[in-house]
Image (tube, rainbow, N blue to C red):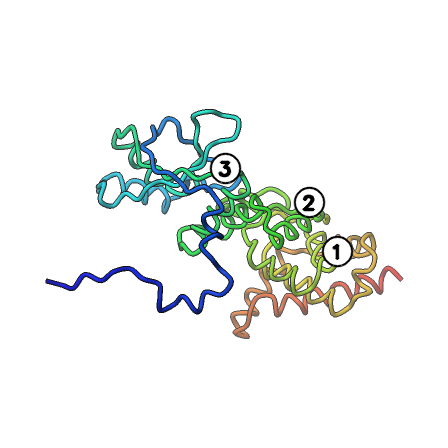
């Protein structure tokens, strides 16, 4: 018979610095209950929708091969101000699959958590799971009040940019929508809020809003140019006026071709294209 080994963290205890049992016992322990699916809810402020081929395929697969041996308890929290209702933190897909099979009750681990704690738990549980998109994770971080995500949202709000909750084709977007929160957040940290907001406004506040152009390579190129020539971004009105005649779609198409030829990122030729345009535009303004 295979040897059965006890669970012990003794060999790692010395490496867990500054953490004690009291840190955990200070909060009320979650409890396990069987709860009716009809009493479970999804808070879309931080949760993802079951939309798209991958999510739908996942639910159908769980339903087709349903087994209690594979069904982990659903993590939920009581909905504030709504007695008897629970918000799903983790387990929306398997709960939906159970409902598809006609199951009425599922095992739930009920946590004592306010809204921010729920969103934070969702982000922590799902952050390392491939199936969750950077967009879904971003919205969960914002809902949890995470500092970097909040700072990014505030900068985007100032520039009229919003992050989609799920993948959207450029042709179906509205002005200012983007599907690249992670890469754009990197640009905010690298170049600072003033340059980042100015770059976004070059896109959203010119012509018809350049729908679908709030893309990471475009924003990175704009940030690079404005960071290299600080005086160009010093006056918002002057910069916007200079960018009114810039064709983002034509420039992006040209940059993609050059990027393939030169074996570089799209933002590299875009820096040159945008720089040349602004240099001519500011000369004309003088």
Could you say where residue 237 lies in the image, as x and y percent from the top left? 82, 52
Residue drawn at the location 49% of the way across and 36% of the way down: 43
Q: Earlier in the sequence, mark 3 or mark 1?
A: 3
Q: CA distance from mark 3 to mark 2?
A: 30 Å
Residue 151 left/right relative to 279: left
Depth check, front residue: 110 or 219: 110
In the rendered image, which residue does mark 1 sit on?
A: 243
Judging from the image, what secondary structure is the residue with disc 1 in?
helix
Could you say whether the residue bearing mark 2 is in a helix, strand or loop?
Answer: loop
Query: Spatial distance from mark 1 to mark 2, Cα to Cα?
Result: 12 Å
Q: Position of residue 182 (x, y in %)?
A: 55, 57
Q: Residue furthest left?
A: 1
Viewer-closest of 246 and 2: 2
Q: Which residue is mark 2?
A: 208
Q: Position of residue 263 (x, y in %)?
A: 52, 74
Q: Residue at x 48, y 44 (%)?
A: 27
Q: Which mark is residue 44?
A: 3
Q: Earlier in the sequence, mark 3 or mark 2?
A: 3
Which quadrant is home to the N terminus? bottom left
The answer to whether residue 18 is above or below residue 66 is: below
Q: From mark 3 to mark 1, how far is it between C-alphas?
A: 37 Å
- Residue 153 as seen in the image, left or right of residue 194: left
Residue at the extreme bottom of the image, as rendered: 262
Residue at point 67%, 55% (across, down)? 247
């Amino acid at each position: 018979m295979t040897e059965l080994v006890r669970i012990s963290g003794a060999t790692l205890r010395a490496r867990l610095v500054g953490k004690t049992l009291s840190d955990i016992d200070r909060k009320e322990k979650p409890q396990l209950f069987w709860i009716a699916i009809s009493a479970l809810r999804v808070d879309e402020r931080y949760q993802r929708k079951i939309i798209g081929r991958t999510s739908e395929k996942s639910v159908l697969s769980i339903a087709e091969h349903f087994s209690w041996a594979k069904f982990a308890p659903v993590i939920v929290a009581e909905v504030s101000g709504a007695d008897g209702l629970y918000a799903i933190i983790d387990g929306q897909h398997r709960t939906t699959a159970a409902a598809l099979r006609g199951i009425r009750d599922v095992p739930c681990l009920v946590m004592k958590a306010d809204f921010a704690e729920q969103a934070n738990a969702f982000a922590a549980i799902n952050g390392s799971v491939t199936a969750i998109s950077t967009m879904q994770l971003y919205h969960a971080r914002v809902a949890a009040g995470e500092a970097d995500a909040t700072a990014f949202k505030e900068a985007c709000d100032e520039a009229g940019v919003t992050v989609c909750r799920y993948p959207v084709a450029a042709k179906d977007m509205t002005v200012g929508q983007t599907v690249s929160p992670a890469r754009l957040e990197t640009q905010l940290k690298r170049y600072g809020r003033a340059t980042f907001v100015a770059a976004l406004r070059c896109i959203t506040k010119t012509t018809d809003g350049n729908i679908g152009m709030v893309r990471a390579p475009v924003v990175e190129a704009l940030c690079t140019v404005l960071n290299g020539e600080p005086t160009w971004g010093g006056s918002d009105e002057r910069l916007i006026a200079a960018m009114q005649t810039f064709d983002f779609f034509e420039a992006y198409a040209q940059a993609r071709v050059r990027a393939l030829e030169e074996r570089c990122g799209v933002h590299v030729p875009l820096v040159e294209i945008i720089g040349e345009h602004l240099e001519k535009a500011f000369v004309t303004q003088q």
